[in-house]
Image (cartoon, rainbow, N blue to C red):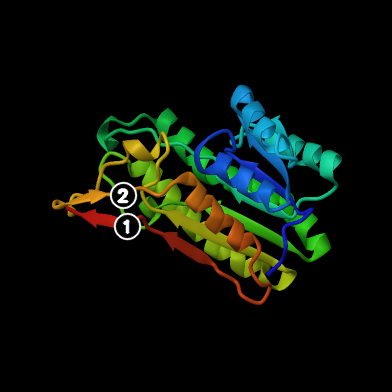
Amino acid sequence: MIPLKDRVALITGASRGIGRATAIVLARRGARVACIGRDDNALHDVVEEITSTRGEAFSAFCDVRDEWSVKRTVEFVLQQYGTIDILANNAGLGIQGRVEEYTLADWRTTLDSNLTGAFLFSRAVIPIMKARKFGRIINVSSGAGRNGIAGYAAYCASKFGLIGFTESLGLELRDDGIQVSSVLPGSTDTQFGKRIPEDENAEQSERARLSPFEVAEAIANLCESNPNAWISELVIRPLVVKQ
């Protein structure tokens, strides 16, 4: 196990849901946390919650779809903390719609937010991690990265793509002390998770949902994993309670 004490973690989409929970959990374990997102008020609340319990964190606005914004954010984190040990690519969104009615703008927004953003941030932090021969890059995909969902083709395409990106990047970096992992949460009790349709095959059951903190604890465990034990993919499923 690698303790997170004084490790620097950059978390995108940290204003709510899994990103918020991950920021809080990593800070509880001693990491210094950079909370990245586009909702300044919500980010402020996360930082305040962390610092109120003697954790260390700050927030920064960033549009993960914009190359310059990502570069500026990484430089700002380096100014504040001197390095980046952990990157959690969690920022994402899902715009519902059937393919024949879907606009190109919505397609690009979804792919750029969920996939291109992970590429831009990963590319930006790799030289920093290589120089220290240590790093953890956690890409938050989804069960929808393995199974298609009607009405969410763009979202599924982005999450399928994120898994492929993660697998390739992990192979590129495994000799540099950098572990790259995908996390695939099932149904999670977040604003977005509640909009995803239930499993059509689960007719006689009530689908349980993971809490964001259950997913965050799994992410934190990945960050602490032994250097010789590369967990390239972690699937987390909620229990299904039979009626």
Question: Which quadrant is the N terminus positioned in?
Answer: bottom right
User: Please, which residue is most extreme toward the front here?
Assistant: 53
Rendered image: mark on residue 239? 1
Residue shown at 73% from the left, 52% from the top: 30
Disc 1 is placed on an element classified as loop
Report the side of 221 relative to 51 (left or right): left
Instruction: Name the spot of residue 147 as percent of width and height, x first.
Output: 32, 55
Whether label 2 touches label 1, CB < 8 Å: yes
Q: Position of residue 128 (x, y in %)?
A: 79, 54
Q: Residue 13: which quarter of the image?
A: top right
Residue ID for mark 2 = 208
The image shows residue 228 at horizontal and vertical percentages of: 66, 77
Q: Earlier in the sequence, mark 2 or mark 1?
A: 2
Three-letter amino acid code of the residue under disc 1 = Leu
Which picture quadrant has residue 190? top left
Give the Cα separation between the discs numbered 2 and 1. 6 Å
Q: Which mark is residue 129?
A: none
* Residue at horizontal 69 percent and vertical 47 percent from the top: 27
- Estimate how packed mark 2 is, as few (under 14), some (14 to 19) or many (20 or more) residues with alpha carbons within 10 Å: some
Q: Horizontal and vertical percent for residue 216?
A: 54, 51
Residue 96 vs 181, above or below: the answer is above
Residue type at the position of mark 2: Ala
